[in-house]
Image (cartoon, coloured by chain):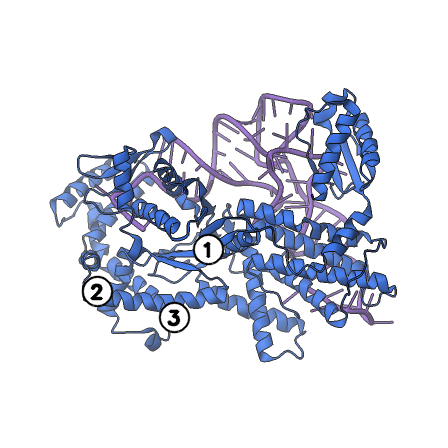
RNA sequence: GACCUCGUAGCUCAGCUGGAUAGAGCAACUGCCUUCUAAGCAGUAGGUCACAGGUUCGAAUCCUGUCGGGGUCACCA
């Protein structure tokens, strides 16, 4: 039983003892605000109807009773209806002395297997800042769930097929002149990305005239269907007054022109060949994808993320058809005259959703249904977490509902860890406008910044080349990771590449600096185990112990909410508390041996908890900086 | 148009299962290195929690509406 639970029970008994009511609303306590004296606060307003007295008197009466029934509660004060309780300081010193030697905080193991799917890149372009947020969140959520006692499987579902891959392939085939990553001296993912851009540029070049003609009414369709579609769109374009709507129609016309261009037609043809298993196309596809994978692995390694299981869409994209069939037989789906299969989700406040095309091929949803089933049959997972951007909120709502309709045993364990987009000062990142922040570039810049800042401070004497490299690496990643993870995943966030990321204040470097300071002390003296003593504690020592005490419950909450930001906030609170202590008391020069040892224990204790909290964020510490 | 989401200090963000005088960091200003790492500590200044109603003993937090930003409504993924 933790302290909070014990106090809550005491409060319940106190109220029963005094007022004789046993049917009480839930008793809740919270930490006392810094401006008031006390450790925990009980708000009595909801309970005055039992005492039938003023809030002040009620609070005082409960306070008196608490002191007599619970020895851990030393004193209390009442402000309006707030009963502030102060614990006997020995509660804190005992907690610390019982726990300082524990190597790591891990919550009790559960019988629960959780898959966390994250990253899930397309193989036609290198990773960018948006992927970085995804990777950091995914990895951290997996770490947190693991520390909270789950058996965790980290999975990556790679989108390795489709029209976008064919664009890169076609461009390389036509304009690539057999260029390889070695020849170009480029990471494989960047080389493939380069040809994706080449494709888009060529396509633009070749269709520019036709598009502007089409806006003027001149359009020559390659088939009747397109002509009808165009005529319809053009008519609408001429009628509409709304600028936004006309922009939309123009985009549709643009797509129509682009799609019937020679380049796009060839691309479609290539995709058909790929689906039919054409040997040459497959060979090219394999070659270019392998370049990309090598590039991705490199970036993953630098970011410090990894996976236990890879899924590939080329292997899963036809899955799910059986499930659609099953749903049709069960009557939860329906078939239209053209043969396409749909689900009606209007009873759930959603729409009708296509599950299988009229030609019998899969769509995104079909695939995801199949992959969900596959994940379950592979690992018998209890929970399946999808770390995917919030632009897909609707998709996952639908997917989860469908799996429920199919009575899948795992359906209720599916969860979309939805996160917000990363914005630049100029707005959203757009690859077409070249405003994308490349992941590798960003990591390089961060490394250089870390190096620069370190050299400015001039504390690197005696460090070897390798040690410096590790320092810059860990420091730059601490800065980047903390910056990204400290904001609530659900919210969109702003990243300003110009004024880069801070190394001072509420940052990753601040936290690993605190850790390094502690290491510096522990290098000079080691704490020893000792019988529980009741030395008087300094306020800032109590402050640190309270933070240490809070860790397991913070970890639990972070796991429940899939929220690394809660761990970030905790790391800050703990680091701040320790830095304050560092300024307030001496440690190595403390003359009282018992006190000195207790402070060394506290240094050790803080350092262990800080390190294990940072591990949950994927942040590595340094012993010197 | 429908649905979802966000709006807190000049900037970036906490706080949101209702509780006290709304908190950090950055930027600005003031102190603290002959003492364990000043990437630190202490302090000053900065707010109509978008706006308007409502529920409540009590609302940044819950409900409704308005305004503003973003997203989604494909036989794309």
- Name the secondary structure under disc 2: helix
Q: Residue drawn at (45%, 64%), measured in percent from left and top?
A: A300
Q: Which residue is mark 1?
A: A153
- Name the secondary structure under disc 3: loop
C-alpha gap between disc 2 and disc 1: 33 Å
Q: Residue furthest front?
A: A111
Is A622 in front, or is A266? A622
Q: Could you tell which of marks 3 and 1 lies nearer the N-terminus?
A: 1
Above or below, A300 against A370 in this view is below
Above or below, A88 against A312 in this view is above
Give the number of the mark in front: 3 or 2: 2
For the N terminus of chain A, the quadrant is top right
Q: Residue drawn at (75%, 51%), measured in percent from left and top?
A: A95
| Quadrant of res A525 | bottom right
Q: Residues within 10 Å of mark 2 (few under 14, many from 20)?
A: many
Q: Which chain gets the blue colouring?
A: A
- The answer to whether the residue labelled 3 contacts the one labelled 2, judged by CB atoms less than 8 Å apart, is no
Q: Which residue is mark 2?
A: A281
Q: Are marks 3 and 2 on the same chain?
A: yes
């Amino acid at each position: 039983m933790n302290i909070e639970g014990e106090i809550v029970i005491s409060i319940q008994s106190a109220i029963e003892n005094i007022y004789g009511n046993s049917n009480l609303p839930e008793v809740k306590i919270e930490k006392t605000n810094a401006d008031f004296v006390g450790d925990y606060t009980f708000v009595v307003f909801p309970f005055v109807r039992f005492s039938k007295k003023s809030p002040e008197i009620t609070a005082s009466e409960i306070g008196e009773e608490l002191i007599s029934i619970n020895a851990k509660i030393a004193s209390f004060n009442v402000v309006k209806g707030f009963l502030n309780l102060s614990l006997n300081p020995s509660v804190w010193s005992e907690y610390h002395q019982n726990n300082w030697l524990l190597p790591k905080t891990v919550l009790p193991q559960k019988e629960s297997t959780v898959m966390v799917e994250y990253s899930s890149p397309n193989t036609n372009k290198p990773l960018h800042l948006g992927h970085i947020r995804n990777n950091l969140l995914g990895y951290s959520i997996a770490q947190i769930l693991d520390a909270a006692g789950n058996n965790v499987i980290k999975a990556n579902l790679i989108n390795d097929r489709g029209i976008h891959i064919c664009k890169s392939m076609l461009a390389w085939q036509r304009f690539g002149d057999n260029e390889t990553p070695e020849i170009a001296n480029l990471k494989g993912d960047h080389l493939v990305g380069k040809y994706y851009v080449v494709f888009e540029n060529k396509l633009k070049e070749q269709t520019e005239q036709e598009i502007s003609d089409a806006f003027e009414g001149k359009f020559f369709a390659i088939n009747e269907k397109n002509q009808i579609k165009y005529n319809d769109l053009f008519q609408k374009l001429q009628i509409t007054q709304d600028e936004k709507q006309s922009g939309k129609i123009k985009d549709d016309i643009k797509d129509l022109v682009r799609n019937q261009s020679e380049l796009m037609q060839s691309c479609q043809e290539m995709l058909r060949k790929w689906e039919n298993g054409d040997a040459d196309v497959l060979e090219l596809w394999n070659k270019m994808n392998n370049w990309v994978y090598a590039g991705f692995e490199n970036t993953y390694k630098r970011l410090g993320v990894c996976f236990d299981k890879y899924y590939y869409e080329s292997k899963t994209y036809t899955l799910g058809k059986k499930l659609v069939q099953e749903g049709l037989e069960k009557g939860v789906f329906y078939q239209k005259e053209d043969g396409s299969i749909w689900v009606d989700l209007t009873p759930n406040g959603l729409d009708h959703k296509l599950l299988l095309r009229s030609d019998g091929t899969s769509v995104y949803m079909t695939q995801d249904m199949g992959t969900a089933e596959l994940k379950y049959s592979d690992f018998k997972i209890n929970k399946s977490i999808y770390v995917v951007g919030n632009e897909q909120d609707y998709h996952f709502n639908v997917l989860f509902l469908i799996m429920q309709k199919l009575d899948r045993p795992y359906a209720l364990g599916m969860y979309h860890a939805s996160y917000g987009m990363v914005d630049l000062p100029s707005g959203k990142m757009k690859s077409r406008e070249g405003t994308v922040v490349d992941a590798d570039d960003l990591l390089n810049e961060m490394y250089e910044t870390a190096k620069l800042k370190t050299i400015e401070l001039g504390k690197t004497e005696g460090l070897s080349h390798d040690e410096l490299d590790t320092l810059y690496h860990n420091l730059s990643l601490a800065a980047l990771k903390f910056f990204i993870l400290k904001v609530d995943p659900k919210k969109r966030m702003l990243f300003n590449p110009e004024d880069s990321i801070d190394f001072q204040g509420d940052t990753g470097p601040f936290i690993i600096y605190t850790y390094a300071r502690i290491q510096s002390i522990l290098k000079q003296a080691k704490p020893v185990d000792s019988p529980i003593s009741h030395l008087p504690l300094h306020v800032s020592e109590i402050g640190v112990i309270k933070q240490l005490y809070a860790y397991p419950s913070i970890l639990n909450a972070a796991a429940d909410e899939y929220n690394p930001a809660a761990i970030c906030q905790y790391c800050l609170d703990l680091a701040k508390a320790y830095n304050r202590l560092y300024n307030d008391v001496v440690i190595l020069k403390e003359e009282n041996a018992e006190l000195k040892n207790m402070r060394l224990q506290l240094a050790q204790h803080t350092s262990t908890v800080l390190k294990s909290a940072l591990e949950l964020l994927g942040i590595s510490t340094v012993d010197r900086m």
